């Protein structure tokens, strides 16, 4: 079995199993802890609607906090949007998803995707520099923060390397890229990258609790 | 009695330096050994870990945005005042003990065990530099209720005997006497009589049956006794069937502030029992921030089932009474700005009530910058105003309020929380500031119009 | 030893004009990426070359490679070049059969010991030598015997080069490539299913002209023809970059000649000369005809997941295993929560 076969086969398969098992493990492990009973008289229902609303609105910073948080917010948005473009709007990736979803969707031209990928990496580096130099972030950051950054940037970088080639064989670069994706998927459920699924839980919970009180969400 | 544990010994032989860091005071209660304190802290952190808490503690991204919302950090640039850092020990314990991967955290030592030095340092972070104002909870992109986590973390600190001295003393006195300032039922009765007399107002006390139970905070009873008269005037004008009760009058809850859930429950149950005894349909809470949180949102949970009566903050009561025409006020010709008590507005959901009242007062209302749900905290809530070693920090933070108020150029400043009032008074004195905070309730009481029946 | 005529003599006898012959040498120089100054050398070498003996062994094959080679549209010089070699043994093209044919093979081996070329098409079964025999001799024995005195071995087609279709999953005959069995002689792989005719003859011409083997890649394929991917030389590449893809075989995109990536084209990972040299003397190649590249010059192309599965599709296992992972996750989560709650209860009791 050559590297590409390994990457597209066992590597991705194992990564998929670990991703699924790890994500469910973490979610179930949290959700099945004791529930906090709430007997106060609500001002509003604070149900699923509230949860969904806050899942959406918390993506945007409230005006009073905007000036102080603008810079990292923009960087984070560029990074996430670039990542989204590259992962979900690049046709070969869409074909990958179609392979197990059974349906596809329109993509964007490669040049735009490349730009998105570069933007994601550049903002990623800017965020790293910020984490390494800002006093607050230096204090609170740990291994998880740096490793998660690295394991996310790696597939981006290896993916961008494929069109750039640098004299290396296409299959080799493709195999390395797929392996770095597998590594990302394996790490995802365990560190702070778990926010991909936890964000719905945390925002939703706060939405429900505070909407119920009629308080600002 | 609390003991003071000074960390920096004065070396009389050492060469004098231009700057010496201030002596750090780590307060301790009881004479437990370090091991026991650590265990108690850990156990009582762990008690709080439910699925909601767990999702919050598992969801932090270390983005640091909470720091930009916190007045303590913003005014000092001290990274240790980053809100999520304040609950770092709480978070660490969660990941080691109860999180989904706890087994592996312990097995591979992925997070350190909490040490006594950690707990000592964190006493300052959890008490001196947090008013549980909740701004951090609003900015967090993950929606983590950081402020709520601080309140829970305090449970561990209390049981470990590692809370600030004054806060402990005050809470203890509240548990033992029923009031943080030692106001006994007799004293309360005395002061009620005095106010009834002085202000020529009927103040019912210990009525057997009434629709409304009114309660007060010790700060008001002691420092702003006119509040009692004002409350009476308003309830009388509204034609309420109401009473004060000596077996349930203390609205403050220093058990909640200090982190002792048993004392918190005791204080809350006193009021609930009194209300039930008289068959009250409504409990009106005084101008106090955390009292609102303690009864309106946590009261039923202490009781273990839904409360058999409604709960309103006095600002809500006034808004309702004014909106329905139960009471009327004169229009006032002045400009006014309003400081939001964090526990009533942002955390409590009653932001609009005060504004309704102000509208009825007909003043030229000047909302300060960020007024309403995003308002800056007075810096004295959550027990901070009781901690003397936190005074310099609290004064530093207060500049935010001064700038806010001054920018409105309003004639007057009011709020609806006696603790905020106390904090403002203290800082006003410290800075020689020319604004004095008034009480919204007193403003209404002073300007009640006769109801044309 | 019988004096064999030189290639030049043969061509002359066939009536090939000097002009035509030189034109062929020029074309050959061009596709071998040699400068024009080499043309006279090629001409001289071919003219004076003794027709080398070539033994063509056919094992587990479909004869497609021979068909491709002989499918020159008109009597081109490529076809004639086969008169320039002494093809002493070839199942499809030889007149002899049975013992006579085997005798001819042995004679050629003895007469040209150390100097003959062995061309092989088809894979060799190792599962049971009886799966493929010629004149009662198993493929593996015939290969061993024949390459013993060879100068070089050329694996013609993907079966000989990499195992091809017999070697595809589940490989019931235990088919292997020539390269796996011949390790002591130079082996050139000329894969493709079938290979392009011009590529086959150019490799032979190189050997005839210079007596050397062309520069080979990691898989033993001549770099001159297998050095670039179809994708990198495909005329539809701009459509790939612009994101214009045919979604089905007769949709507007297909009619407009858009990129066939979504329909399973393996161009990006296929090294061959199809996109430049093309087929049928430069007429067209699969993509130009509207069909995605199969990747036929790559090892294991039959098992790449499907001709119509896009290249980026993962090679996933069953969904059951994934469901199993989900169940495992639930179990671990429940266990973790239970352990957490137990710890809580314990600490609450201890106070």
Image: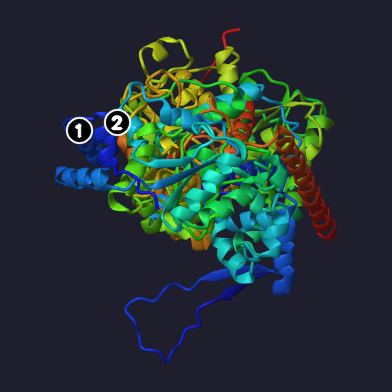
Q: Is C125 above or below relative to B200? A: below
Residue at the extreme front: C2
**In front here: B223 or B101?**
B101
Frontmost residue, C342 versus A67: C342
Instruction: Indicate left or right for B414 with C303 as reference.
Output: left
Q: Chain of mark 2?
A: C
Outermost residue toward the bottom in this view: B13
Relative image position of residue A23 (x, y in whole percent): 66, 41
Q: According to the image, label 1 marks what residue?
A: C23
Is disc 2 in contact with disc 1, using a CB cutoff of under 8 Å?
yes
The answer to which quarter of the image holds residue B276 is top right
Residue B220 visible within the image: no
Task: Work out how far the residue at label 2 is from the one at label 1, CA to CA, in angstroms.
Answer: 10 Å
Q: Give the residue at x 58% y 33%.
A: C305
Q: Residue C91, image x and y in percent? A: 54, 35
Q: Is residue C222 visible?
A: yes
Query: Looking at the picture, how far across and down is residue C66, in whole percent?
Result: 47, 32
- What residue sits right under mark 2 in the picture? C77
The percent position of residue C220, horizontal first and vertical second, equals 43, 50
Q: Is disc 1 placed on a helix, strand or loop? A: helix
Badge 2 and badge 1 both on one subunit: yes
In what element is the residue under mark 2?
A: helix
Neighbours of disc 2 within 10 Å: few (<14), some (14-19), many (20+)? some
């Amino acid at each position: 079995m050559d590297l590409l076969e390994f990457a597209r086969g066992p590597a991705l398969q194992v990564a998929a199993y670990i991703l699924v098992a790890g994500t469910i493990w973490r979610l179930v492990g949290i959700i099945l802890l004791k529930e906090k009973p709430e007997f106060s008289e609500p001002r509003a229902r604070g149900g699923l609607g509230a949860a969904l609303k806050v899942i959406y609105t918390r993506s945007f910073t409230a005006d009073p906090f905007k000036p102080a948080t603008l810079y990292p917010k923009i960087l984070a948005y560029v990074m996430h949007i670039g990542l989204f473009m590259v992962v979900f709007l690049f046709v070969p990736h869409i074909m990958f998803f179609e392979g197990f979803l059974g349906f596809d969707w329109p993509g964007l031209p490669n040049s735009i995707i490349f730009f998105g990928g570069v933007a994601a990496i550049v903002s990623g580096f800017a965020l790293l520099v910020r984490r390494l130099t800002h006093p607050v972030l230096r204090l609170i950051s740990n291994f998880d923060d740096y490793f998660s950054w690295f394991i996310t940037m790696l597939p981006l970088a290896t993916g961008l390397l494929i069109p750039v080639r640098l004299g290396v064989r296409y299959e080799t670069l493709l195999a390395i890229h797929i392996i770095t994706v597998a590594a990302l998927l394996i790490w995802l459920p365990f560190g702070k990258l778990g926010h991909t699924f936890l964000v719905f839980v945390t925002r939703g919970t706060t939405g429900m609790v505070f909407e119920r009180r009629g308080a600002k969400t | 009695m609390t003991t003071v544990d000074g960390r920096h010994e004065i070396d009389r032989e050492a060469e004098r330096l231009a700057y010496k860091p201030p002596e750090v005071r780590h307060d301790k209660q009881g004479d437990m050994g370090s091991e026991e304190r650590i265990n108690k802290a850990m156990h009582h952190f762990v008690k709080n870990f439910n699925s909601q808490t767990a999702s919050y503690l598992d969801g932090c991204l270390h983005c640091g945005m909470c720091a930009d919302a916190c007045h303590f950090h913003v005014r000092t640039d001290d990274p240790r005042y980053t809100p999520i850092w304040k609950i770092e020990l709480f978070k660490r314990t969660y990941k080691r003990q109860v999180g989904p991967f706890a087994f592996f955290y312990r097995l591979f030592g992925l997070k350190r065990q909490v040490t006594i030095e950690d707990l000592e340092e964190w006493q300052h972070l959890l008490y001196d530099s947090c008013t549980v104002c909740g701004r951090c909870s609003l900015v967090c992109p993950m929606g983590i209720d950081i402020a709520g986590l601080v309140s829970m973390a305090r449970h561990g600190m209390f049981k470990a005997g590692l809370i600030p001295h004054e806060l402990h003393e005050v809470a203890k006195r509240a548990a033992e006497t029923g009031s943080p300032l030692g106001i006994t039922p007799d004293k309360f009765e005395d002061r009620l009589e005095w106010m009834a007399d002085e202000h020529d107002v009927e103040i019912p006390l210990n009525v057997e049956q009434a629709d409304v139970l009114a309660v007060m905070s010790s700060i008001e009873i002691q420092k702003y006794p006119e509040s009692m008269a004002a409350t009476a005037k308003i309830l009388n004008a509204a034609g309420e069937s109401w009473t004060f009760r000596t077996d349930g009058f203390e609205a403050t809850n220093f058990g909640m502030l200090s982190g002792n859930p048993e004392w918190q429950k005791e204080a809350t149950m006193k009021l609930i029992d009194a209300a039930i005894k008289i068959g009250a349909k409504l409990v009106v809470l005084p101008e106090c921030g955390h009292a609102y949180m303690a009864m309106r949102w946590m009261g039923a949970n202490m009781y273990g089932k839904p409360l058999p009566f409604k709960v309103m903050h006095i600002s809500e009561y006034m808004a309702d009474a004014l909106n329905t025409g139960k009471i009327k006020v004169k229009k006032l010709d002045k400009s006014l700005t309003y400081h939001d008590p964090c526990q009533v507005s942002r955390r409590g959901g009653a932001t609009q009530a005060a504004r309704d009242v102000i509208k009825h007062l007909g003043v030229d209302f000047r909302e300060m910058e960020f007024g309403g749900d995003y308002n800056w905290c007075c810096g004295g809530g959550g027990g901070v105003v009781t901690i003397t070693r936190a005074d310099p920090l609290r004064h530093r933070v207060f500049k935010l309020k001064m700038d806010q108020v001054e920018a409105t150029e309003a004639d007057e400043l009011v709020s609806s929380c006696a603790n905020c009032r106390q904090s403002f008074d203290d800082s006003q004195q410290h800075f020689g500031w020319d604004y004095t905070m008034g009480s919204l309730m007193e403003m209404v009481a002073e300007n009640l119009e006769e109801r044309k029946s | 030893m019988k004096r064999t005529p030189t290639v030049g003599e043969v061509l002359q006898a066939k009536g090939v004009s000097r002009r035509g012959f030189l034109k062929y040498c020029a074309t050959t120089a061009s596709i071998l990426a040699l400068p024009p100054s080499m043309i006279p050398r090629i001409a001289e070498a071919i003219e004076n070359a003794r027709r080398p003996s070539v033994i063509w062994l056919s094992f587990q094959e479909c004869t497609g490679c021979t068909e491709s080679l002989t499918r020159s549209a008109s009597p081109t010089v490529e076809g004639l070049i086969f008169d320039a070699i002494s093809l002493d043994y070839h199942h499809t093209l030889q007149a002899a059969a049975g013992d006579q044919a085997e005798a001819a093979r042995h004679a050629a081996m003895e007469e040209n010991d150390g100097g003959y070329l062995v061309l092989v098409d088809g894979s060799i079964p190792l599962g049971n030598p009886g799966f493929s025999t010629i004149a009662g001799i198993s493929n593996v024995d015939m290969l061993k015997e024949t390459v013993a005195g060879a100068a070089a071995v050329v694996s013609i087609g993907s079966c000989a080069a990499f195992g091809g279709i017999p070697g595809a999953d589940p490989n019931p005959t235990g088919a292997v490539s020539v390269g796996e069995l011949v390790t002591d002689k130079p082996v050139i792989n000329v894969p493709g299913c079938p290979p392009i005719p011009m590529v086959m003859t150019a490799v032979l011409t190189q050997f005839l002209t210079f007596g050397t083997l062309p520069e080979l890649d990691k898989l033993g394929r001549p770099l001159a023809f297998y050095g670039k991917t179809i994708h990198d030389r495909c005329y539809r590449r701009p459509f790939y970059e612009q994101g214009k893809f045919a979604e089905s075989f007769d949709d507007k995109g297909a009619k407009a000649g858009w990129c066939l990536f979504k329909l399973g084209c393996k161009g990006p990972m296929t090294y061959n000369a199809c996109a430049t040299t093309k087929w049928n003397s430069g007429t067209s190649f699969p993509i130009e005809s509207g069909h995605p590249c199969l990747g036929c010059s790559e090892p294991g192309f039959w098992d790449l997941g499907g001709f119509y599965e896009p290249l980026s599709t993962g090679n996933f296992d069953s969904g059951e295993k994934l469901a199993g992972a989900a169940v495992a996750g639930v179990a671990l989560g429940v266990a973790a929560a239970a352990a957490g709650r137990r710890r809580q209860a314990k600490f609450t009791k201890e106070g």
